[in-house]
Amino acid sequence: MAVLVRSASQLFNLSTKRAVLCSSNVESKRLLHIARWLLAERKYTEKHEWISVENGIGTVGVTDYAQEKLGDIVYVELPNVGDTVSKGEEFGALESVKAAADIYSPVDGEVSDINSNLSGEPELVNKSPYDEGWLIKIQLSASLSDYKGLLSEEQYQQLIKDEDE
């Protein structure tokens, strides 16, 4: 999502998703920097998971690259709602006709929802890894510092380029 700014004092309000005017250029620049960071579509791990955060809830899944490398997903193992997950720790697994792969949490928090559709349709991970094939939702327990070490879209694209070489 792009943030359009017509003047230095016009910004995007995250809660109402509308443009607002700020009283000073300094405040505008600071808020614009924060808005760009918060509106980032996804962050990625080096193990090919993604997370998208809205209102303190992170939706987690595996990347298109990961599902493509695994092949046809036939089974998804997920944690229970209420389970605690830790950044970098395993929380589930994907099984495909080719292999099995562990899934790792990109952040610390508590599982607030699981994609129950995957129990009957694990192939959703292949068909739509960023939309219908999401895995879990996590109520984040840490501040923005939990995002340290996660990759931007550009960094992730470079990672997979390097892996394919």
Image: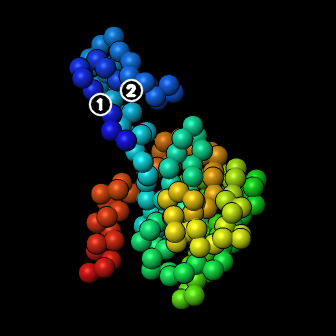
* Total numbered labels: 2
Instruction: Give percent across and percent down for residue 93.
Output: 63, 74
**Sooner in the amino-acid sequence: mark 1 or mark 2:** 1
| Colour scheme shown | rainbow
Instruction: Give percent across and percent down for residue 101.
Output: 56, 79
In front of the other: 97 or 32: 97
- The amino acid at mark 2 is Phe
Helix, strand or loop under label 1: loop
Instruction: Give percent across and percent down for residue 109.
Output: 64, 50
Which residue shows up at 38% across the image and 26% down it?
12
Q: Is residue 9 visible?
A: yes
Residue behind mark 1: 4
Point out which mark residue 71 bears: none
Helix, strand or loop under label 2: strand
Q: Characterize the local packing of mark 2: few (<14), some (14-19) or many (20 or more) Cα atoms within 10 angstroms.
A: many
Figure check: 108 above or below 74 = above
In front of the other: 109 or 133: 133
- The amino acid at mark 1 is Leu
In front of the other: 150 or 131: 131
Splitting the image into 4 quarters, where does residue 78 fall? bottom right
CA separation, marks 1 and 2? 8 Å
Q: Characterize the local packing of mark 1: few (<14), some (14-19) or many (20 or more) Cα atoms within 10 angstroms.
A: few
Residue behind mark 2: 12
Splitting the image into 4 quarters, where does residue 20 fall? top left
Q: Can residue 105 be seen in this view?
A: no
Q: Do the residues labelled 1 and 2 touch (CB within 8 Å)?
A: yes
